[in-house]
């Protein structure tokens, strides 16, 4: 049975036209799946579903996501990340097509009211647990890694977090391109997160960013925020994460135009 699949040109180019066509008609495509972004069940026979291809140096894993959570895209990851994900799938005896790939960072933009002013904000939430490099404990350490990088723990959302020097948010021609962090040994900044394709932001977001020349970046572990369709719901989710000790944040200068 044909599936309600969104399959980007980039994914098609990676897997080839023949395999792409088989997916679209229902061959090698699950009906039910766990969304690689929000981790909740989806059904490609009933709702629009994105194909997400995780690509390492030698291996590729095809995963599926609600189209409302992620667009169809190719995500470049290290071979170690991908092999670790494949090993976990084998150990669980789960079919590879049904299982989520390695954790990637999801980013949502919105305006957040703080100190009587609307601030442009980005909310970063990984699709799964993030461990320290080399760790085999299976513990999600995303929050502690952020604090190590200089992010500020936010037990409540009532003030603008401090500036994280050396980091910046790259916006060009009205689109969000990347969150940049300092390069090694004082070198040029490198992307901590980079959009697969530039993300459009609203006119009000861009206006606020141009006025303040900085963006607030909030981050929380997987499952803390979720994809919120409205800014008031996003703010409520941020407040809940803060109250639960799961929110970190920083102010970052605006880079670009």
Image: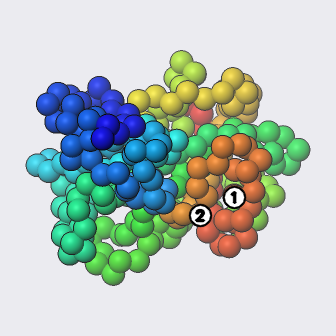
Q: Is residue 172 left or right of residue 76?
A: right
Q: Can you say whether 222 is above or below 136 in the image?
A: above
Crowd class of label 2 (few under 14; some 14 to 19; many from 20; radius 10 Å): some
Residue positioned most to the top = 173
Q: Which is more toward the observer, 176 or 73?
A: 73
Residue lying at 33% horizontally and 81% vertically, measured from the top left: 137
Question: Can residue 78 be seen at all in this image of the molecule?
Answer: no
Disc number for residue 224: 2
Q: Is residue 7 left or right of residue 211?
A: left
Residue lying at 46% horizontally and 59% vertically, measured from the top left: 41
Q: Which is more toward the observer, 133 or 49?
A: 49
Residue lying at 71% horizontally and 43% vertically, measured from the top left: 230
Q: Locate residue 121, reporting x and y percent.
A: 66, 43
Sequence order check, earlier mark of 1 and 2: 2
Dot 1 lies on which element? helix
Dot 2 lies on which element? loop
Q: Would you name the residue on which mark 1 appears?
A: 237
Q: Are marks 1 and 2 in contact (CB under 8 Å)?
A: yes
Residue 131 placement: quadrant: bottom left
């Amino acid at each position: 049975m044909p599936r309600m699949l969104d399959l980007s040109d980039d994914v098609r180019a990676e897997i080839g036209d023949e395999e792409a066509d088989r997916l679209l008609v229902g061959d090698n495509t699950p009906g039910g799946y766990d969304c690689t972004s929000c981790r909740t069940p989806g059904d490609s026979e009933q709702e629009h579903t994105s194909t997400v291809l995780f690509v390492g140096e030698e291996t590729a894993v095809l995963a599926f996501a609600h189209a409302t959570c992620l667009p169809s895209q190719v995500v470049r990851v290290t071979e170690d990340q991908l092999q670790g994900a494949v090993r976990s799938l084998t150990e669980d005896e789960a079919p590879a097509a049904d299982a989520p790939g390695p954790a990637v960072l999801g980013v949502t933009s919105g305006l957040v009211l703080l100190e009587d002013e609307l601030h442009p904000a980005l909310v970063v939430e990984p699709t799964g647990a993030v461990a320290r490099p080399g760790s085999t404990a299976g513990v999600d350490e995303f929050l502690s890694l952020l604090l190590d990088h200089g992010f500020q723990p936010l037990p409540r959302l009532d003030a603008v977090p401090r500036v994280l020097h050396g980091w910046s948010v790259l916006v060009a021609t009205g689109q969000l391109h990347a969150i940049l962090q300092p390069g090694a040994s004082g070198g040029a900044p490198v992307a901590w997160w980079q959009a697969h394709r530039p993300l459009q932001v609203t006119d009000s977001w861009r206006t606020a960013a141009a006025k303040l020349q900085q963006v607030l970046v909030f981050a929380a572990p997987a499952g803390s925020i979720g994809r919120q369709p409205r800014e008031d719901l996003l703010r409520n989710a941020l407040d809940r994460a803060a109250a639960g000790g799961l929110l970190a944040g920083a102010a970052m200068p605006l880079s670009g135009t």
